Amino acid sequence: SQNSKGRTALHIAVNNGSIEILKYLLAQDSVDSNSVDDKGNTALHLAAQYGHTPMGPKLAKIILSVEGIQCDNRDEYGQTPFLVACFSGSLEVVRNLFSIAPSLDRHAVDFKGQCALHHAAKSMTDSADLVQFLLEELKFDCNEATPDGVTPLMFAVSSSNKNIVGYLLSVTELDFRAVDREGKTAM
């Protein structure tokens, strides 16, 4: 059953960081590990959202161990757990996602046309390690722009992510003169 926000016991266990309850629920045949709440979030979305906390990567790893887990579900903003993990700045969750689901759509974009690199560049944790992983391991383009022309550097600057800005400026292919639709640059 679901609460008023459409959340199941599985969602609540993740929200509360209850590892033992999460494991118990996932072991039950009657529990749908891919159920969504009113905002389209699966338990994996929520675990990815908490990726920046000590508990988030553990929760995500447990959920990812379930057979039949769907890693490309989209929430109400068109975000997959991968995009959510990038915004939370969790390199560990991103690595776990790709080790469990190597065919994951790394080129997914949300409804605003923002890819994983955009989400990582504006992440709440200023994780240059994650941005470096996306560029070097997953081969993202450091100049990839949204439909509005916003680049990863522009997101990092507007989010005051100094570590990410510093790292991006060290990438030789970076075009720091790129201009968005409104004629603005990152600087």
Image (tube, helix red, strand yellow):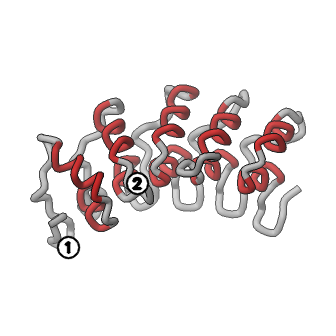
| Residue 107 numbered mark, or none | none
What amino acid is at disc 2?
His
The foreground one among 107 and 138 is 138
- Picture layout, residue 170 above or below residue 64: below
- Picture layout, residue 126 above or below residue 102: below
Q: Sort mark 1 into few (<14), some (14-19) or many (20+) by Cα contacts within 10 Å.
A: few
Drawn side of residue 161 relative to residue 51, left or right = left
Residue pictured at 14% horizontal, 58% vertical: 178
Question: Where's the N terminus, which quadrant?
Answer: bottom right
What amino acid is at disc 1?
Glu
Q: Position of residue 141 (x, y in %)?
A: 25, 41
Drawn side of residue 5 relative to residue 126, left or right = right
Q: Where, by quadrant of the figure, is residue 107 drawn?
A: top left
Q: Position of residue 103 (x, y in %)?
A: 50, 27
Residue pictured at 29% horizontal, 67% vertical: 158
Residue pictured at 29% horizontal, 53% vertical: 163
Q: Sort mark 2 into few (<14), some (14-19) or many (20+) by Cα contacts within 10 Å.
A: many
- Picture layout, residue 120 above or below residue 181: above
Q: Position of residue 181 (x, y in %)?
A: 21, 68
Mark 1 and mark 2 lie on one chain; the one further toward the N terminus is 2
Q: Position of residue 56 (x, y in %)?
A: 62, 46
**Which residue is denoted by mark 1 in the rendering?**
182
Tell me the element at label 1.
loop
**Which residue is denoted by mark 2 in the rendering?**
119
Residue pictured at 53% horizontal, 26% vertical: 99
Instruction: Note whether residue 74 is visible.
Output: no
Q: CA distance from mark 1 to mark 2?
A: 20 Å
